[in-house]
Amino acid sequence: MPEPSFDGVAPLAATRGVSKRYGTTLALDNVSLKIHAGCSIAVAGRNGAGKSTMVRLLTGLDLPDAGEVRFAGKPAPDIAARAWWRSNVACVYQKSTVIPDLTVVENLFLHDHPASTFGYIHWREVRRLARNELELWGLEVDVDQRAGDLSVGERQRLEIARALRQGSRFIILDEPTARLESREISQLFDHVMRLKRAGVTFLFISHHLQEIYEICERVAVLRDGRLIIEAAVGDLDQGDLVAAMVGDAYQPTEGTGADPDARHNRNGNLGPSDPRPIVLDVDSVSVAGSVVGASLRIRAGERVGLAGLAGSGKSELAQAIVGQRKPDGGRILVEGQALPPGREDSARDIGISHVPEDRHANGFCGNLSVEENIALPVLQRISSWGFVSRRRRRAMANAMIARLQIKVSDAAQRTSELSGGNQQKTVMGRALASDPIVLVLEYPTAGVDITSKQTLFDIIRGTDAAVLLVSDEVDELAICDRVMVMFAGRIVREFASSWQEHEMVEAMEGLSQ
């Protein structure tokens, strides 16, 4: 049967009644979706809604159990035809596939170097071709530069350039902005719009709904593996979009700034009547090349944001607090006890827990179960005579799973099998397992859906720990009692709970010092 057309042209790509099951989980249930050339589409939905499965089917990494995937009106080939798939569709994942120890040109021509008749690579010619490709697709980097030295946004644009060089004009962007600063997001979107004008079609997956309205013409919503709605973005306001994603679970959050019950004086500092003790005291800390004389104090139960763009020093300061970097000056005290500089083990022992920015690289062990990941920081606490009590470990993990609403088959499920949002909840559970005095959170809700985000926010609000939340995301900073802004290695401004978004952005850009 011929594929339904749009303006007389078969869709660039389409799924027709596809269903996919993994064990007992029905990941996709009879989903039909058309992607037309030149009409970029967003796929929205909560974690576990089926977005990742849809990507796997559209990129030939999996076969549907029922239904079919089609390109230009014809059935897609077998998944073994990898060259065909690479030349027709590519995905830029949240976790980069760029090999950091190779150069830009080596990544661009990975496994596909032009060679002479004798099989030797003509590097001078390859570099010339690479410069032409990068110029054609608007990426200004040195082809001989080590790819690991590129920014996250540059690595993403390198992956797009590699896909375009291989012939694909259909690019899937899977949570592309989850690890980008505001400036890099603007650069990526400018790049996407330029490529769209050149005839490239994008399928865009993001939990940041405003981004969908910015760069997409259509949006499809998945919920529990089913296609709930597919429409032009102009016909669907944000409230309707969220309602389609979460159903009856949606409860909107109002306003910008922190909770209305936060206790502040007019300067944004906790007043002298606040009885809570100071538990984290960062005094004139400097880190070579990134932080200059930073000082801040956080009371028990207080949530303080640390905002700033890439290169502001906020990440380096956070890493100094958790012991991952050794300060060159100043001191860090937890409940009056000095933290040995550059000692992550000592930071943990003294009561500091950490949720890192990159959960895949530093947050969890994918081959361990959810139960084992959560228990890692407290093995001594649940051990007797050097042996871990499985009963106590399981009880502790189940309590944390219930508290954080982690969606698992059981506590023994491997963490790598979870959706991104449930992996992030597991990382949070691991940080909370030790009942920390200080909780340092770097972008704690990056790449999670709106309901998982709300769950994490509720947990952060409810903890008795002193919270340092490192981010430049407005909705994350909005739950803080105060926000400290860093620029060029220094803390330049402090905001109370009534801050406005434009003021925060100006401070992060260094415009209002």
Image: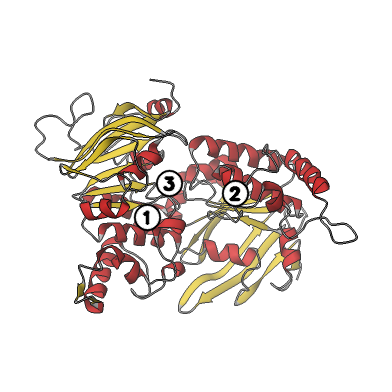
**Does any portion of residue 3 appear in the rendered image?**
no
Which element type, helix, strand or loop, lies under badge 2?
Answer: strand
- Spatial CA distance of label 2 from label 1 is 23 Å
Which residue lies at the image location 25% right of the left edge and 37% below the top edge?
Answer: 331
- Spatial CA distance of label 3 from label 2 is 16 Å
Disc 1 marks which residue?
451
Which element type, helix, strand or loop, lies under badge 3?
Answer: helix
Which residue occupies the foreground of this view, 95 or 230?
95
Q: Amino acid at mark 3?
A: Gly
Q: Earlier in the sequence, mark 2 or mark 1?
A: 2
Q: Are marks 2 and 1 in contact (CB under 8 Å)?
A: no
Which residue occupies the foreground of this view, 144 or 129?
144
Image quadrant where residue 256 sits? top left
Around disc 3, counting alpha carbons within 10 Å, would you say few (fewer than 14), some (14 to 19), or many (20 or more)? few
Which residue lies at the image location 22% right of the left edge and 24% below the top edge?
Answer: 267
Above or below: residue 131 compared with residue 37? above
Q: Are marks 3 and 1 in contact (CB under 8 Å)?
A: no
Q: Residue 484, image x and y in percent? A: 32, 32
Q: Mark 3 against mark 1, which lies toward the viewer?
A: 1
Q: Residue 509, image x and y in percent? A: 45, 27
Quadrant (top left, top right, bottom left, bottom right) of the N terminus: bottom right
Which residue lies at the image location 73% right of the left edge and 59% below the top edge?
Answer: 88
- Spatial CA distance of label 3 from label 1 is 14 Å
**Does any portion of residue 328 appear in the rendered image?**
yes
Q: Amino acid at mark 2?
A: Arg
Q: Residue 332, image x and y in percent? A: 25, 40
Q: Residue 19, image x and y in percent? A: 57, 73
Disc 2 marks which residue?
218
Above or below: residue 297 compared with residue 512? below
